[in-house]
Structure formats: C-alpha cells, structure tokens
Image (spheres, rainbow, N blue to C red):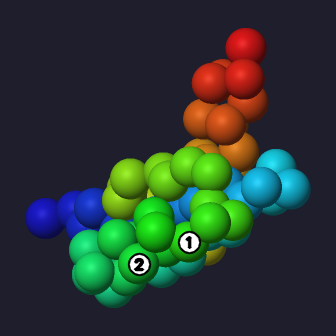
Amino acid sequence: MKSKGILFWAYLDEQGKVYVKRYVNDRIIRNFESMPYVKGIFDPFYARDMHEARIMVYARYIQELN
C-alpha cells in the first residue's frame, strides 16, 4: 500500500510571504487564522516532504494570482 505522504498546511502573511508548516492539528490552523498578519490559509494537503510541499504551495499560489 502506497503512503499518501505527510500532511502539511501553509499560510500567507501580510508581506506576501508563504510559510509552509507540518500539520499537527486544526487548532493550530485556527489560531493562525485569528492572527492579524495572516492573510490566507492553504488547507492541509499531502506531500512527500517539505521540499515537495513548498513546490506545491508556490504552484497553487502562482495559479491563484493569475
């Protein structure tokens, strides 16, 4: 059986920088949603590792800008 990978999530700050985090639980995401500097949240998704997670988030971010 093939593993789905590791769960990650990400957020966009007011400066336009994207931060990718390893998913722990929804409570952490909810806490970040309430921070005034957080302008957007990328829902949890699976990736092999942090490198792949960053590539996936940046690709989605670029796509949503266009």
Residue type highlighted by circle 1:
Met
Picture quarter with the N terminus: bottom left
Residue 46 or residue 2, whichever sits in front = 46
Picture quarter with the C terminus: top right
Res 36 seen here? yes
Q: Residue at x 63, y 24 (%)?
A: 64
Q: Assess disc 1: are there few (<14), some (14-19) or many (≥20) residues with their C-alpha within 10 Å of its C-alpha.
A: few
Q: Residue at x 73, y 30 (%)?
A: 62
Q: Which residue is mark 1?
A: 35
Name the residue at the front extreme: 36
- Whether tag 2 and tag 1 are in contact, CB under 8 A, the answer is yes
Tell me if 50 is positioned left or right of 66 in this view.
Answer: left
**Residue 15, quarter of picture:** bottom right
Q: Assess disc 2: are there few (<14), some (14-19) or many (≥20) residues with their C-alpha within 10 Å of its C-alpha.
A: few
Q: Which residue is mark 2?
A: 31
Label disc, if present, on residue 44 of the rendered structure:
none
Tell me if 19 is positioned left or right of 35 in this view.
Answer: right
Helix, strand or loop at label 1? It is: loop
Q: Is residue 12 above or below residue 36?
A: above
Res 53 seen here? no
Q: Residue at x 28, y 81 (%)?
A: 27
Q: Is residue 56 above or below residue 24?
A: above
Q: CA distance from mark 2 to mark 1?
A: 7 Å
Residue 50 place in picture, x, y as percent: 61, 72
**Residue 29, quarter of picture:** bottom left
Residue 56 place in picture, x, y as percent: 59, 47
Residue 54 place in picture, x, y as percent: 67, 59
Tell me if 36 is positioned left or right of 3 in this view.
Answer: right
Name the residue at the top extreme: 66
Helix, strand or loop at label 2? It is: helix
Residue type highlighted by circle 2:
Asn
Residue 49 or residue 27, whichever sits in front = 27
